[in-house]
Amino acid sequence: MTLHPDTATARHALPSYLDPNRLGPWGIFLQQVDRVTPYLGSLARWVETLKRPKRILVVDVPIHMDDGTIAHFEGYRVQHNTSRGPGKGGVRFHQDVTLSEVMALAAWMSIKNAAVNVPFGGAKGGVRVDPKQLSLGELERMTRRYTSEIGLIIGPTKDIPAPDVNTNERVMAWMMDTYSMNVGETVTGVVTGKPISLGGSLGRREATGRGVFTVGAEAARRIGLDIAGARLAVQGFGNVGGIAAKLFAEAGARVVAVQDHGGCVYREAGLDVPALLDHVKRHGGVAGFEGAEALDRDQFWDVPCDVLIPAALEQQITRENAHRVTARLIIEGANGPTTPDADDILRERGVLVVPDVVANAGGVIVSYFEWVQDFSSYFWSEEEINERLIRIMKGALNAVWQVAEDKGVSLRTATFIVACERILRARDLRGLYP
Ligand code: GLU
């Protein structure tokens, strides 16, 4: 176990909940901040700000189960940084989610929102529950009680939740309703990713996948990789991986392999993506898909491909498997899929990684549009939304590409430089209160 160096000095002693063990997503985030600190000039004096979340709320979520018993779930909402605006980030329902994971996810939202220059800080929420084990009624009660508990710190100008792993438009509708009932008025802007008929935005559901496709295609163009005919391997076939695969296939790429929680399917000539999406809708995963060869989940990493899209959970590309990746280009649809060790191996091997904090920012960009539309009660067309999304995504990629070239660093470090400068400049200008 490596101790975080700051634990050694009383002046910067870490609060007890900040596990000094550098393993795990929060430890990875700390390493990413350390890598960028030498580039921050005089703003580096504020860097400790990033190494501890601004606010953490842990809540007990008790609900009546259908069988008459009472169940308790552990819930979190973490506001990592609000220097540039209200907290913003999704809510994840997952049996393995932990406080330190939510802290890292909140921190990556701070970086992401600053990297694409939307006026938000970073936040994230989670409940330790496997939603597939709940009935619809139980899921609704759990969502409502969780929302009520975090109601203390969320709000349209304070912190705005959105969908993440295992949460969707229906969950956002319940969250919006619960918050609204508690404050006595309909507040559509308290969450984004809502159904269209409740103040949701056109294009939001597809936005993350569309953003992954947009920066992926642009990065491919820059390294001379032709998307038409390129072989794509996708990990995770939910809202991000599924939509990105569909858009790449429409642009002529061959989606040769898809791995998810339940299995891995492979077809050299390219999978029928619409048929696979339909299969996943009906069966809950890619396993059992006809018209493809079934592989062991682990064989996914050896599949010959040009582009790899990890779009599932954190810490998937590690020191152990980074040398097995055959792709030239990795586009991170998930948050935190690559460890710093793996980043170094991939860079040495000449594999380009477009980091999560740019690649998957499409979701929060259209969340920003949704929030603006809710405030003004004036809704935009889908063409307008997609056009603005693409413009922001390409602009952000161009900007970090330039920094990466100028400073001779990876795209991830370049993105952290751009984002940390924006966050810490805001911090510096605001000064300390009192
Ligand atoms: N959960 C998504 C993410 O990780 C979207 C967050 C949002 O729209 O606020 O970026």
Image (cartoon, helix red, strand yellow):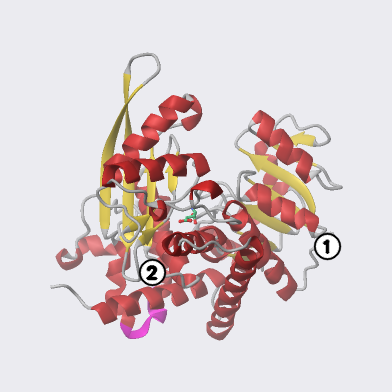
SS at circle 2: helix
Residue 305 visible, this angle:
no
Q: Residue furthest right?
A: 269
- C-beta proximity under 8 Å, tags 1 and 2: no
- At 38% across and 80% down in the image, what residue appears? 40
Residues 363 and 256: in front is 363
Tell me which corner region of the image, top left, top right, bottom left or bottom right, holds residue 248.
bottom right
Residues 341 and 245: in front is 245
- Residue 363 percent across, percent down from the top left: 54, 58
- The circle drawn on residue 228 is 1
Residues 253 and 21: in front is 253
- The circle drawn on residue 34 is 2
- The circle drawn on residue 105 is none
Identified by mark 1, the residue type is Ala
Q: Is 203 a magenta residue?
A: no
First in sequence: mark 1 vs mark 2:
2
- Residue 89 percent across, percent down from the top left: 42, 55
Q: In the image, 285: left or right of 313?
A: right
Relative vertical location of residue 245 with respect to residue 83 in this rendering, above or below: above
Relative vertical location of residue 434 with respect to residue 170 in this rendering, above or below: below
In magenta, the rendered stretch is 37-42
- At 52% across and 69% down in the image, what residue appears? 412
Q: Residue furthest top?
A: 67
Disc 2 packing (10 Å; few <14; some 14–19; many ≥20): few
- Residue 288 percent across, percent down from the top left: 73, 29
Q: CA distance from mark 1 to mark 2?
A: 39 Å
- At 19% across and 75% down in the image, what residue appears? 432
Identified by mark 2, the residue type is Asp
SS at circle 1: loop
- At 48% across and 71% down in the image, what residue appears? 115
- Residue 130 percent across, percent down from the top left: 46, 31
The main secondary structure of the magenta stretch is: helix
